[in-house]
Amino acid sequence: MSGPQTSVAGPAAGGSLWIPAAERGRVQGIFFMGAHLSGGLTPMLVAAPLPLLGWRGVFVAFGMPGFVWVAAWLHWFRDRPSEHMRVSPAAKKT
């Protein structure tokens, strides 16, 4: 569960062109809160399907969304807001 959250928030938490400097502290707080929350919830989420799927099945079930996430991320992510297709021209100027 922490993989998708970390892949997005990790780079942003350290400083990103997408996040105004005044809001980076809040983003870091949300990032670290999510990291700790997912670390606490993951064992419960893994334990539920374990008897039904076995450890290999759980591994595959939790790993497959990661491949979907990577495909979506590579399609959508851009290094700079000015390069992103969905950012308005007015926002690109700021």
Image (cartoon, helix red, strand yellow):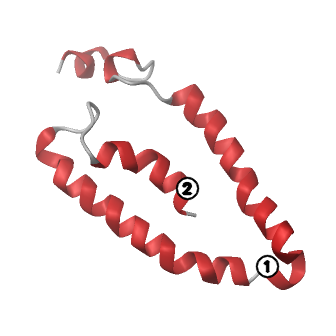
What is the quadrant of the N terminus in the image?
bottom right
Mark 1 neighbour class, 10 Å CA radius: few under 14, some 14 to 19, many 20 or more? some
Task: Name the quarter where the C terminus is drawn.
Answer: top left
User: Where is mark 2, residue-wise?
Assistant: 3
Q: Earlier in the sequence, mark 2 or mark 1?
A: 2
The answer to which image quadrant residue 84 occupies is top left
Position of 64 with respect to 7 (left or right) is right
Q: Amino acid at mark 1?
A: Pro
Residue that mark 1 sits on: 49
From the top left corner, tell me how far across and down residue 72 is, in percent: 61, 35
Find residue 36 and report its image quarter: bottom left
Residue drawn at the location 55% of the way across and 56% of the way down: 3
Q: Looking at numbered disc 2 in the image, what kind of residue is underneath it?
A: Gly
Mark 2 in CB contact with mark 1 (< 8 angstroms): no
The residue depicted at 43 percent of the width and 23 percent of the height is: 86
Residue drawn at x 23%, y 17% as measured from the top left: 90
Q: Secondary structure at mark 2?
A: helix
The picture places residue 2, in percent across and down from the top left corner, at 52, 62
In this picture, residue 36 sits left or right of residue 66? left
Identify the residue at horizontal 18%, vertical 38% (top origin): 20
Residues 26 and 2: in front is 2
Q: Residue 66, image x and y in percent?
A: 66, 49
Q: Secondary structure at mark 1?
A: loop
Determine crowd level at label 2: few under 14, some 14-19, many 20+ residues with C-alpha closer than 10 A.
some
Relative horizontal placement of residue 50, taking residue 89 as reference (left or right) = right
* Number of numbered discs on residues: 2
